[in-house]
Structures are given as structure tokens and as C-alpha cells.
Image (tube, rainbow, N blue to C red):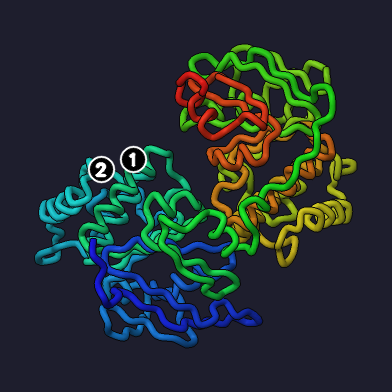
């Protein structure tokens, strides 16, 4: 689509101060009609603050916003929506027990004499869904829809408000590859109809898949903008964190001889296996594979979260019986789960109790928790992992994604694990925080811990592993040494093709 000479949206010299912090320092952002504009930066770079100002959730201290060439003053989120600016948050904002049509027109239902005109509302919803090429019934309950279709309902709500600009915050973080492809088709449809999309993401590969322009923020300042399809990942990383992509992955130490973990014939009928592999002390075994290949099922079967139908596990040369996560922890085998918020943390508890959760028996005497010992141990782990939290009483839900991941890791370090399984360790966290997680993984390996690293980010697996195991259909189709684990070769195994 040809770009207009005048931008649809202009944010000029936007400045925002919080007590003791300059969150935004004269930031500019210009977005054209029918453009997908990616907004990148580490946590704390200012992306969310800038978009909160645009969506009316936060006032600016200085600067100017123009929409279609006219200066606007955005007083509230509802006012922003009337101006044609809608925001779709990472945590979707639907009412689960209401229908699709109800959610699209919530608070704006067509009515006559106090009665909702339900047929008209469902017909209007159907037209919006058809515009998005969506196979969703307007009378379906929101709770029954997969996440990708819930996002679609959010987009339809924005379109029902005649949105000119739609802001999407990490829209693909909860999606499968297939659902992500559906979302990208919807975004292209929005582009074709002239809607501008501001797209916040931590995933560099999305720059070329869906974006037209990339703007990078760092420390509250605009570092620069570039065409999405021509800017390299190396340049983006350097703009975001001041390091090149080659510097993101730390150097790995040589694994020690022997095997800290041996798995023989691990199976779960119809889902997994049989799978056999070994991990040396200090070795990082990366596990790659497409969605549905059985990677997470492998992790859950290893720690006893899912009942297995066959197989044997040895740790440090001794067979262990693992029928539950508690058995796994006692054997020295711990999992950092894929969904840290739902499965790894108690979000309503403070950092202190989240870290000590697995060590209460050791930190107790005669049934009473030794509070000073708990605080001393947790503080030591928080300092060691450089968890950024104002106090140990900070609730886990208030931490950034990278610091939440460190809290889960701190909990397992407290029990001195022999083997750690990382399932998607950097999902939803920014490039700078990823670098810190990678350093921690490499540090643990140097200390002799065996590590199984499961990730859908192939670059992460290749950059951080001594060997790469490839899964397909619940089985390991290959285990490749680092020097021969090229992206092409891994993908051929993952897709069931002959190795090249």
C-alpha cells in the first residue's frame, strides 16, 4: 500500500516523569495509515508508558499527539476509543460468560425502549467477523474460544469503534504457531483496510514476518527506526541492549565425563516415546521441535507431572522412582515450567515465600518455620541471581517476566538440584533479560548441573546447547553435536525429512 505523505499518527517529544524516574525523554513516534509499526525494547525501556499515554491510561508531562494532522488531547481510555485509538492488552479483556456479540458491543448494545436488539447486534457482529474472515459464531461464549479467536473478538471490538489505530501488546506470546499465522493474516487484513497497527513484541523474528517499520526504545529514549525487512537482528539487538547478537550467548564450558541423567525408553501411551537419552554433568542438551512434537510432554513425564507408561530414569548412576514432582525434587530433578505464571509461581505471594516454597521442610524446626533463616537464604539467592525487586515482600505478580523467571530458578537452586529442565525459559521476556537467563544457565552448567533446555526459539537452542535433540511425533528423531546442528538440518529432522 502506498504511504501517505502525512502520517496518520504523530507523537512528538513525549515526556513522562515518575518520582525519581524519567520514563520517557522526548520520544517521537510516527505511524502511517495501513502500516504495522513494531515497537521494540527491553522491559523498562518505555514502550508500555508510551502506549499508556496513547491509549489514555496515563497523562503525559510534555509533548504533542496528532491524529490525521490534528492535535488531540487524550483524556481517558474511553476518550481514546472515541478518537479511534484502541489497545489490545497481552492479558485479554473479555467477559468469559458473555457471547462474542456481547463482548464486541459491551456497553454499546443497540436497543429500543430499553430492550437490547439482540438479532441486530449479532448481525453486526457477524459482519465484523466476516470482515476478518473469521469462522466464529456471534452467539458462542467467549470462554469456549481458543486464545487466537479471543484476540480476534478484541480486534472486532476495536473495529466496531471505527478504530484508526490498534495497539497490540505481545499478541503472539500465548499462541501456537498455527494461531500466530492466523493472527498475522488478520493483521494483513487490517493493513489492507487502512488501519494502522502498533505492535509491541520481544520476538525479533516477527519484525520481518509482519512489520513494516521498527522503532526501538532504550532507557526511555528513542534509539531509532528502520524498515523491518532490511534491518538485521544484530542491529536490533545492538539498538536495544548495546550488545551484538553474537555476544548474547555466553561461552560454554566443556561438560564433565559420565552421565548425571540417563533416560531409557520413557513413554506415555499415545503421546510420548519411547525416548532415550543421556546428559553429562555440566552439559546443556537442547531440545528442538515443532509445536506438538512432544517437547513439553517430555518435560512433564520426566518430573512425574504426567503418569508415564514405561521407561527408567537414573540420576548420578542410580535408578530413581519418579511418580510425582515431589519425587523428582527429592531426586534432584527440577522443572522450570513453560507457563511460569500458572505453574511456576504463586502470584499472590511475595518473592520471599515463592523462593522458600520448596525448602520449607529444611527451613523448619519442630513444625515451625525459622523466619530469620528463611529470609537470610532467600536474600542470598536474590542477590546471587540479581533479581530486581524493591523488597522480598514484593508480590511475584508485580515483577517483570525476566525477574519472575529468576524467582522460579532461585526456588530450585535452594534445593541444590543435580538436573534442571528449562521449558521455554525466555518466553515473554526481553532481550536483555534473556542474556541474564543465558548467563545463569551457563553458570549452572559450569557448576556441574545437567540441563535439558526446551525452546521453540531455534536460535536459542543452537546458541546455548552442547548437543541438540530433535523431537517429532513424541520421539527423538536425532541428537546432533553442536558443530553440525545447523538450522536447516534441525528443521529437516523436525519435519520428518531426510537429514541434509
Residue 474 percent location from the top left of the image:
52, 21
User: Helix, strand or loop at disc 2?
Assistant: loop
> Is 478 placed left or right of 260 in the picture?
left
Provide the secondary structure element on which disc 1 rests: helix
- Residue 356's disc is none
Query: Neighbour class for label 2 at 10 Å: few (<14), some, many (≥20)?
Result: some
Residue drawn at x 63%, y 79% as measured from the top left: 21
Neighbour tally class for label 1: few under 14, some 14-19, many 20 plus, Cα within 10 Å = few
In the displayed structure, does residue 271 sit left or right of residue 18?
A: left
- In the picture, measured across the screen, residue 437 lies left or right of residue 166, that is right
Q: Position of residue 193 (x, y in %)?
A: 20, 60
Looking at this view, is 19 or 108 the one in front?
A: 19
The residue that appears at 31% across and 63% down in the rendered structure is 35
Residue for point 37% across, 74% down:
30
CB atoms of marks 1 and 2 within 8 Å: yes
User: In the rendered image of this protein, does residue 17 appear above or below residue 236?
Assistant: below
Q: Residue at x 44, y 54 (%)?
A: 207
The picture places residue 253, in percent across and down from the top left corner, at 80, 39
Tell me if residue 329 can be seen. no
Q: Which residue is label 1 attached to?
A: 144
Name the residue carrying label 2: 140
Q: Quadrant of residue 282?
A: top right
Give 99 or 494, whichever is nearer the viewer: 494
Q: Closest to the observer: 500 or 223?
A: 500
Vertical arrangement, residue 126 with respect to residue 240, above or below: above
In terms of image quadrants, where is residue 112? Answer: bottom left
3D distance between C-alphas at marks 1 and 2:
7 Å
Quarter of the image with the N terminus in it: bottom left
Amino acid at each position: 500500500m502506498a504511504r501517505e505523505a502525512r502520517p496518520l499518527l504523530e507523537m512528538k517529544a513525549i515526556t513522562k516523569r515518575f518520582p525519581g524516574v524519567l520514563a520517557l525523554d522526548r520520544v517521537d513516534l510516527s505511524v502511517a495509515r495501513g502500516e504495522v509499526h513494531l515497537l521494540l525494547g527491553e522491559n523498562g525501556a518505555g514502550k508500555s508508558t508510551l502506549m499508556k499515554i496513547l491509549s489514555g491510561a496515563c497523562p503525559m508531562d510534555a509533548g504533542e499527539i496528532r491524529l490525521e494532522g490534528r492535535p488531540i488531547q487524550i483524556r481517558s481510555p474511553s476518550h481514546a476509543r472515541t478518537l479511534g485509538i484502541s489497545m489490545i492488552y497481552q492479558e485479554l479483556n473479555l467477559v468469559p460468560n458473555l457471547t462474542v456479540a456481547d463482548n464486541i458491543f459491551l456497553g454499546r448494545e443497540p436497543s429500543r425502549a430499553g430492550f437490547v436488539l439482540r438479532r441486530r447486534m449479532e448481525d453486526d457482529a457477524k459482519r465484523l467477523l466476516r470482515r476478518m474472515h473469521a469462522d466464529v459464531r456471534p452467539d458462542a461464549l467467549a470462554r469456549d474460544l481458543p486464545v487466537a479467536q479471543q484476540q480476534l473478538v478484541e480486534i472486532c471490538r476495536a473495529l466496531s469503534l471505527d478504530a484508526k489505530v490498534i495497539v497490540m501488546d505481545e499478541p503472539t506470546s500465548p499462541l501456537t504457531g498455527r494461531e500466530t499465522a492466523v493472527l498475522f493474516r488478520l493483521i494483513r487484513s487490517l493493513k489492507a483496510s487502512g488501519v494502522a497497527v502498533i505492535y509491541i513484541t520481544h520476538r525479533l523474528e516477527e519484525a520481518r514476518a509482519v512489520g513494516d517499520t521498527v522503532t526501538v526504545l532504550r532507557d526511555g529514549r528513542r534509539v531509532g527506526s528502520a524498515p523491518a525487512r532490511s534491518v538485521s537482528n544484530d542491529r536490533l539487538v545492538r539498538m536495544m541492549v548495546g550488545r551484538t547478537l553474537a555476544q548474547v550467548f555466553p561461552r560454554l564450558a566443556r561438560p564433565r565425563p559420565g552421565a548425571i541423567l540417563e533416560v531409557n525408553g520413557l513413554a506415555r501411551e499415545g503421546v510420548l516415546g519411547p525416548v532415550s537419552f543421556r546428559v553429562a554433568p555440566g552439559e546443556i542438551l537442547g531440545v528442538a521441535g515443532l509445536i506438538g512434537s512432544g517437547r513439553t510432554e517430555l518435560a512433564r513425564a520426566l518430573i512425574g507431572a504426567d503418569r508415564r507408561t514405561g521407561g527408567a530414569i537414573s540420576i548420578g548412576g542410580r535408578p530413581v522412582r519418579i511418580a510425582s514432582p515431589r519425587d523428582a525434587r527429592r531426586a534432584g530433578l527440577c522443572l522450570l515450567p513453560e507457563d511460569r505464571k500458572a505453574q511456576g509461581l504463586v502470584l499472590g505471594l511475595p518473592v520471599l515465600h515463592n523462593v522458600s516454597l520448596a525448602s520449607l521442610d529444611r527451613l523448619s524446626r519442630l513444625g515451625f518455620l525459622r523466619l530469620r533463616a528463611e529470609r537470610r537464604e532467600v536474600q542470598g539467592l536474590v542477590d546471587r541471581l540479581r533479581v530486581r525487586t524493591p523488597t522480598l515482600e514484593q508480590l511475584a505478580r508485580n515483577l517483570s517476566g525476566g525477574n519472575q523467571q529468576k524467582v522460579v530458578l532461585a526456588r530450585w537452586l535452594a534445593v541444590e538440584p543435580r538436573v534442571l529442565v528449562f521449558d521455554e525459559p525466555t518466553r515473554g521476556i526481553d532481550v536483555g533479560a534473556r542474556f541474564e537467563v543465558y548467563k545463569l544457565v551457563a553458570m549452572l552448567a559450569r557448576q556441574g548441573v545437567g540441563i535439558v533446555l526446551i525452546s521453540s526459539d531455534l536460535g536459542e537452542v543452537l546458541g546455548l546447547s552442547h548437543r541438540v535433540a530433535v523431537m517429532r511425533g513424541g520421539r527423538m528423531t536425532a541428537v546432533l553435536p553442536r558443530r553440525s546442528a545447523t538450522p536447516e538440518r534441525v528443521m529437516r529432522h523436525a519435519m520428518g525429512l531426510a537429514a541434509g
